[in-house]
Amino acid sequence: VTELTLVDMDHIAESNINRQIHALESSIGQAKVLAMKARIAQINPEVQVNCIAQRADSILLDQHVAMADVVLDCTDNFETRHAINLACVQYQKPLVSGSALKMDGQVAVYDIRQTEAPCYACVFPPNQAFEETRCATMGVLAPLVGIIGSLQATEALKILSGMGASTVGQLVLFNAKFMEWQTLQTHRHVQCPVCSAHRS
């Protein structure tokens, strides 16, 4: 990996320190993308890191997803997740999605370059009502974020290198309270309002 583009409009708060490895007490108030860039430089200074300190809206996604080899969604709200998915579908880019809340996490890879693979909207329809709960409100077990993030990084590296088999068509669930893993099979929705029109 020689280039990363980070998109986040948020600034580091005290509550981030226990679960986000780029967040230090000395960086409270700093833009998260700048703190992440500094942390990445400490690990591997040869990686080019592009920082975008704004919300990932459709205009921004249209500009940057087209140039990406793989997209990682680490957001905490359905509106942004669906916007990222739409851009990945439009530009036929693999999407590695991860989320964590309380003591539960999930990871999935969506890649419509594979004929029968679902997109995010096939599994979580944009017109379906979901209760919007964010870790800032409901809390999250700090190590769980690292577990889910490591799984996302693993899937992204597998996609980039062609190594192993990705979790396309699977939703991997992890319950930290009972240390239980569960894998659900997911399927393409032939009338999906997002990806059905973009299939070749």
Image: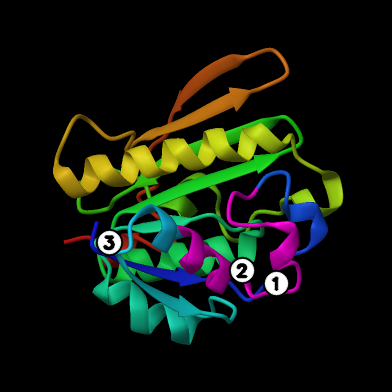
Using the image, determine if residue 136 lies above or below residue 35.
above
Residue on which disc 1 sits? 11
Residue on which disc 2 sits? 32
Residue type at tag 3 = Lys
Observer-nearest residue: 95 or 3? 3
* Magenta segment: 20-39
Using a 10 Å C-alpha cutoff, classify the residue at mark 1 as few (fewer than 14 neighbours), some (14 to 19) or many (20 or more): some
Question: Would you say 61 lies left or right of 74 here?
Answer: left
Question: Would you say 144 lies left or right of 67 here?
Answer: right
Residue type at tag 1 = His
Distance between the alpha carbons at the discs numbered 1 and 2: 5 Å
Quadrant assignment for the N terminus: bottom left
Using a 10 Å C-alpha cutoff, classify the residue at mark 3 as few (fewer than 14 neighbours), some (14 to 19) or many (20 or more): many
Which numbered disc flags the more N-terminal residue, 2 or 3? 2
Number of marks drawn = 3
Q: Is residue 131 visible?
A: no
| Extreme residue toward the right, this view | 137
Residue on which disc 3 sits? 93
Query: Residue 33: which disc?
Result: none
Q: Position of residue 28 (x, y in %)?
A: 75, 67
Residue 77 placement: quadrant:
bottom right
Residue 101 placement: quadrant:
top right
Distance between the alpha carbons at the discs numbered 2 and 3: 25 Å
Using the image, determine if residue 46 lies above or below residue 155.
below
Using the image, determine if residue 159 lies above or below residue 180.
below
Instruction: Give me the residue at 28% from left, 68% from top.
Output: 68
Mark 1 element type: loop
